[in-house]
Image (spheres, helix red, strand yellow):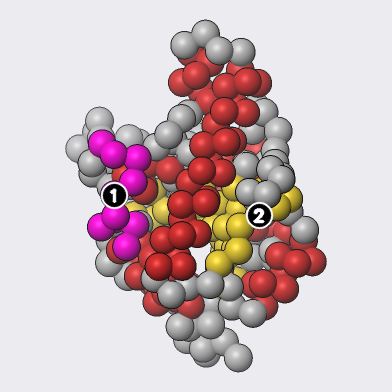
Amino acid sequence: MANNLVKYERVLLKLSGEALMGKGSSIFDKQTIDSIIIQIKEILTLNVKIGIVIGGGNIFRGVNGSEMGLERANADYIGMLATIMNGIALKDFFTNAGVNSKIYSAVAINNIVKGINRDNMLGHLTKGNVVIFVGGTGNPFFTTDSGAALRAIEMQADLLIKATKVDGVYDMDPKIYSNAVKFGTITFDQAIQQNLRVMDMSAFDLCREHNINIDVCDIFKPNCLRDSVLGNTQGTLIHA
């Protein structure tokens, strides 16, 4: 039975590949990853079911590859492989921390990662295992944001947490404008009307259509995930 303080009992965590780097230049920063796993273990103790979509930007970004002259589809395929590498590493980090996890890929690789089987995936969530989704959507020209929205729908999540290095959604870029104003909450329609670049539009539309709230928060702040599932976001909640 879920803790009665929990507002969101099933969540999808969209974790960027860059988040695994921390503030360093190595593709993995052990201290940063340990701190993220501590937060995840904290919400697992609240009986929250959690899936994770991991990006690949710490290894390779498809958009950057196409800018270097790679054909966009091939660049995106390389990016998918980068997410798979991150997922394999993340699973080991979870195992070392005593957390059971299962990895599923939109692009199956025999003897390495299995393709997504929704029934099996839902079974692992029910058991309290963390489910790691890799490979994006399995198709080029779609971002891992779209993959996160798709997996959130498949796992019947009621919240998508976009964990970034920014502590919420602002009316303008806070890195450029010192007078940028942060939203505590905002509706999907308001975000569209104000042209706020929260996620790519296909992902945003999927969440709006399926009534999945989006919480944009700073993963490096203590208790970020706990506050999100309790309904007390440190960042910005986007809702219907």
Q: Quadrant of the C terminus?
A: bottom right
Is any part of residue 152 visible from this angle?
yes
Disc sitting over residue 196 in the figure: none
| Residue at screen point 27% across, 67% down | 222
Return the residue nearer the eye: 171 or 175. Answer: 175
Circle 1 residues within 10 Å: few <14, some 14–19, many ≥20: some
Percent coordinates x, y for residue 159 in the rendering:
57, 64
Is any part of residue 162 visible from this angle?
no
Q: CA distance from mark 1 to mark 2?
A: 23 Å
Disc sitting over residue 104 in the figure: 2
Amino acid at pointer 2: Tyr
The residue pinned by badge 1 equals 29
Return the residue nearer the eye: 101 or 66. Answer: 101
The segment highlighted magenta reads: 25-34
Residue 197 in magenta stretch: no
Q: Is residue 104 left or right of residue 162?
A: right
Task: Tally the marks.
Answer: 2
